[in-house]
Amino acid sequence: MRSKIIALIAHDNMKPAIIEFCDKNKDILKKFDLCGTGTTAKLISEKTGLNVKGYKSGPLGGDQQIGAGIAEGKIDIVIFFSDPLTAQPHDPDVKALLRIAQVYDIPIANNRATAEYLLHSDML
């Protein structure tokens, strides 16, 4: 059985929060294959030592790459620290990603509380 793959995504204002979350939960996260959108993946790898496969930046197609991975059965969980207070120029891509996660019944955490709950659940 293959290791579950967790996608890590964060809007610019939320990058410090996802890095802190990943660092705090490093021992759990290192048991999984991790991927993420461009800068988020790079920063998490640099700041925590976790191995995170990077895709393109979200606005440059990274959200769509994660969505394609979900549709192909290659991504099992999405942790996406979105910024609810700032308009995003690539909002249609974000909505498409959320929609495809729903279509394929993929757990998606949009904030720290949900991510903590998901990561510490029996589901994993």
Image: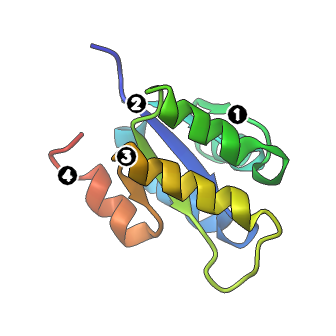
Question: What is the secondary structure assignment of the residue under circle 1?
Answer: strand
Residue type (three-letter) at the residue carrying disc 1: Gly
Residue type (three-letter) at the residue carrying disc 3: Ile
Residue 22: percent from left, percent from top: 50, 51
Q: Is the residue 3 above or below the residue 13 in the image? A: above
On the image, numbered disc 2 is attached to which residue?
32
Which of disc 3 and disc 4 is earlier in sequence? 3
Q: Which residue occupies the extreme top position in the image?
A: 1
Q: Are marks 2 and 4 in contact (CB under 8 Å)?
A: no
Query: In which quadrant will I find the C terminus?
Result: top left
Nearest to the eye among marks 3 and 2: give it.
Answer: 3
Which of disc 2 and disc 1 is earlier in sequence? 2
> Dot 2, how many residues are within 10 Å of its Cα: few (below 14), some (14-19), or many (20+)?
some
On the image, numbered disc 4 is attached to which residue?
121
Residue type (three-letter) at the residue carrying disc 2: Phe
On the image, numbered disc 3 is attached to which residue?
106
Which of disc 3 and disc 1 is earlier in sequence? 1
On the image, numbered disc 1 is attached to which residue?
54
Which of disc 2 and disc 3 is earlier in sequence? 2
Query: In which quadrant will I find the N terminus?
Result: top left
Q: Which residue occupies the extreme front position in the image?
A: 103
For the residue pair 95 and 87, the one nearer the viewer reads as 95
Which of disc 4 and disc 2 is earlier in sequence? 2
